[in-house]
Image: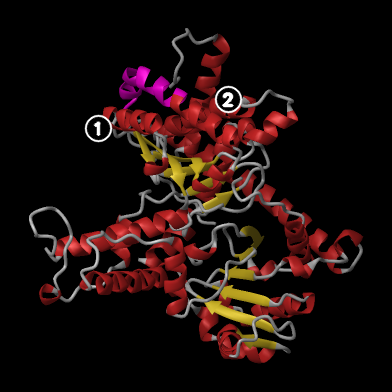
Amino acid sequence: MDLKPGAGGQRVNRFVDPISYHFLQFLWRTLHLLVSLWYLQVSMVQMIEGFLISSGLVKRYGALDIDKVRYLAIVVDSEEAYQISKVIQLLKWVEDMGVKHLCLYDSKGVLKTNKKTIMESLNNAMPFEEAVEKDVLLDQKQMTVEFASSSDGKEAITRAANVLFMKYLKYAKTGVGKEEPCFTEDQMDEALKAIGYKGPEPDLLLIYGPVRCHLGFSPWRLRYTEMVHMGPLRYMNLGSLKKAIHRFTTVQQNYGT
Amino acid sequence: MELYNGERPSVFRLLGKYMRKGLYSILTQGPIPTHIAFILDGNRRFAKKHKLPEGGGHKAGFLALLNVLTYCYELGVKYATIYAFSIDNFRRKPHEVQYVMDLMLEKIEGMIMEESIINAYDICVRFVGNLKLLSEPVKTAADKIMRATANNSKFVLLLAVCYTSTDEIVHAVEESSKDKLKSNEICNDGNGDCVIKIEEMEPYSEIKLVELERNTYINPYPDVLIRTSGETRLSNYLLWQTTNCILYSPHALWPEIGLRHVVWSVINFQRHYSYLEKHKEYLK
């Protein structure tokens, strides 16, 4: 956390009223210090809880209905993604829990760059593209792993937009109608699949990083995805992972109705 | 700022206002979010919890909304976006949909009557979404209040109605395509219709990401998104705009939201401001 003063609201001018300015700055920094101490206490409680769950001392998280997590996504802060050994450990936990389809995302593509190392470290996993090619997505024997970065989000949607635009121009060439461009969400789905983006919408998205923010995961694939902030990758533990998945299995969505 | 209230403020209200002012003077020593978005989740659960008659939750939710907008205005937040009605909500029971539409019409007409107060506070009201899906009376009222407050700029209230992110993205693609057609000056048959003759086809430049971003309904992008009731999903809301947005899910139901939640979201925004600014720079 890096606190910087800003330019909001009604700021006290440091030159006009230096005493008030310094006093308010002191109060502001004290407030943030207290908040940081609170978060430190919360993190310690979560680590202890995670340890108890990992040790099997908390029975509630013993049996997980993992079939409810049809597609899991993990977002990792790009700077933390360089800790490849941590990422591999996390994926091994996910694999052991029985997750069948996983998407790994970091905005800068660090995980994509280390795809080979990661895949070689997993016992029984297959790249998502290979599973699609061989048409074995429904095969429950291996975990499929998809790697994504920011270029697979908005940029992919832009490429799909051009696919739709080109189709419209071809249709307009025939002179059949005089309609303006009018597209549907299904057509956008088809356009994305046509350019290779066949990954479904994740049921659950776990965020490993300093902030609860999806950092640019494909907007087209997040409509009803539950997002859980797991904290920094360096503090990950099996217990927190089990707790997050268990909580997800108890959620009921009404999809706006 | 007190919306819709011509009464003389009580002592407690004045005391509350000055205490808030004191709190804001501390908070504004750090960066304040330019734009906060809200998902108003929990009105029906609140009504059930407090055994209120039908619609009671939404009425309580409206009062909570006024309070939250007051806090945002006082704090110096420039934009607030409210997810008032999703396209998915049309699948609710017809009487429930009608109730929400009637409530919306009542509140918009209330805003039109209080137009002078809204203008005095320099508030711009904008309805964003697929407004063609609104009934005619609601659409007419919405257009009226938007025209009346178009020149205001201190605080912009964006009301997302008949909105989903996926609909917004498709709309942005349509608008960008139309912009491409216009920029190639193809539509020149004099009748305003778009007729493309094969021999006149010019090579088109591709639609760019920046063009799609320009054609989304909601700009600028929010810094914080607050969804009440402890729900951790976006429900097809602002999926495009939340790349660098802090997602905050307090357990309070929407009618229970208060100043402490707004303040907590601002504190967390300040804690992670540098990180998110760096991420924004990287993605540019």
Judged from the image, the secondary structure of the residue bearing numbered disc 2 is helix
- Is residue B228 something that shows in the picture? yes
Specify the subunit that label 2 lies on: B
Q: Residue at x 59, y 57 (%)?
A: A224
| In the rendered image, the vertical position of residue A146 relative to residue A189, given as above or below | below
Q: Amino acid at mark 1?
A: Asn
Q: Residues within 10 Å of mark 1 (few under 14, many from 20)?
A: few
Q: Find the magenta span and give its range.
A: B106-123
Quarter of the image with the N terminus of chain B in it:
top left
Number of numbered callouts drawn: 2
In the rendered image, which residue does mark 2 sit on? Answer: B59
- In the image, B250 versus A177, the foreground residue is A177
Is-magenta flag for residue A219? no
Alpha-carbon span between mark 1 and mark 2 = 29 Å
Q: Residue at x 51, y 66 (%)?
A: A217
Instruction: Locate residue A137: give its quadrant.
Output: bottom right
Instruction: Locate residue B129: give its quadrant.
Output: top left
Q: Which residue sits furthest top?
A: B8
Q: Position of residue B263 (x, y in %)?
A: 55, 38
| In the rendered image, the vertical position of residue B200 relative to residue A216, given as above or below | below
Going from N to C along the chain, the mark reached first, 1 or 2, is 2
Judged from the image, the secondary structure of the residue bearing numbered disc 1 is loop
Q: Position of residue A94 (x, y in %)?
A: 73, 75
| In the rendered image, the vertical position of residue B225 relative to residue A190, given as above or below | above
- In the image, B248 versus A160, the foreground residue is A160
In the rendered image, which residue does mark 1 sit on? Answer: B151
Q: Residue at x 46, y 49 (%)?
A: B223
- Is residue B241 something that shows in the picture? no
